[in-house]
Amino acid sequence: MVAELKNKANIRLSYGSLDIEKILTAFSSIYVESRSTDVNLYFSPEAKFNFQITETKTDLNLGRELSIEDKEILDSKVNKIRHSGYFGKKMKDDQLIINAVGGETNVLAY
């Protein structure tokens, strides 16, 4: 568990869980690659960022602050889907990138 994230994170995980309880508004980037892992990310309600989440056989839960602009099926055989959008306000670059296979992924405001 990470209590607070101020700037950036580059994380690769297999099995278990990742909880980042308080991601501050000024974070610069988060990259998560996970397999059979539960990922829980909690952002400041004032945050503004773009996201790209690619998931395969994953339970994906996005908070009401996230707006999905595009949902693309990359491989229907394995149910691989890419979701693109923004949190709060559309920005120039993707700041949150998640590639998840299995497990559960939750992106919410705290």
Image: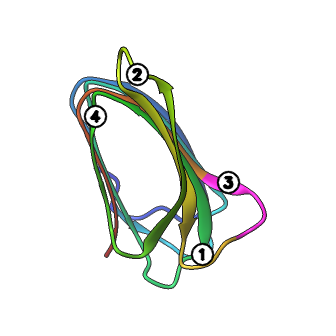
- Nearer to us: label 4 or label 3: 4
Question: What is the number of the mark on residue 65?
Answer: none
User: Label for residue 58?
Assistant: 4
Q: Is residue 98 visible?
A: yes
Residue 45 as seen in the image, left or right of residue 103: right
| Residue indicated by mark 3 | 94
- Tell me how far mark 1 sits from mark 2, CA to CA: 31 Å
Query: In the image, 49: left or right of 105?
Result: right
Q: Quadrant of residue 55?
A: top left
Q: CA distance from mark 4 to mark 3?
A: 21 Å
Q: CA distance from mark 4 to mark 1?
A: 25 Å
Q: Would you say the magenta stretch is mainly helix, strand or loop?
A: loop
Residue type highlighted by circle 1: Lys
- For badge 2, the amino acid type reads Ser
In what quadrant of the picture does the C terminus appear?
Answer: bottom left
**Which numbered disc, 4 or 1, marks the residue closer to the eye?**
4
Which badge, 3 or 2, comes first in the chain's sequence? 2
Eyeballing the image, is 29 above or below 49? above
Q: Amino acid at mark 4?
A: Thr
Q: Secondary structure at mark 4?
A: loop
Q: In 3D space, how far apart are the residues under numbered discs 3 and 1 (Cα atoms)?
A: 11 Å
- Residue displayed at 33% across by 68% down: 63
Residue 76 tag number: 2
N-terminal of the two: label 4 or label 1?
1
Range of magenta residues: 91-95
Residue occupied by mark 1 = 48
Identified by mark 3, the residue type is Asp
Give the percent coordinates (x, y) of residue 16: 21, 30
Q: Was residue 93 drawn as part of the magenta stretch in this picture?
A: yes
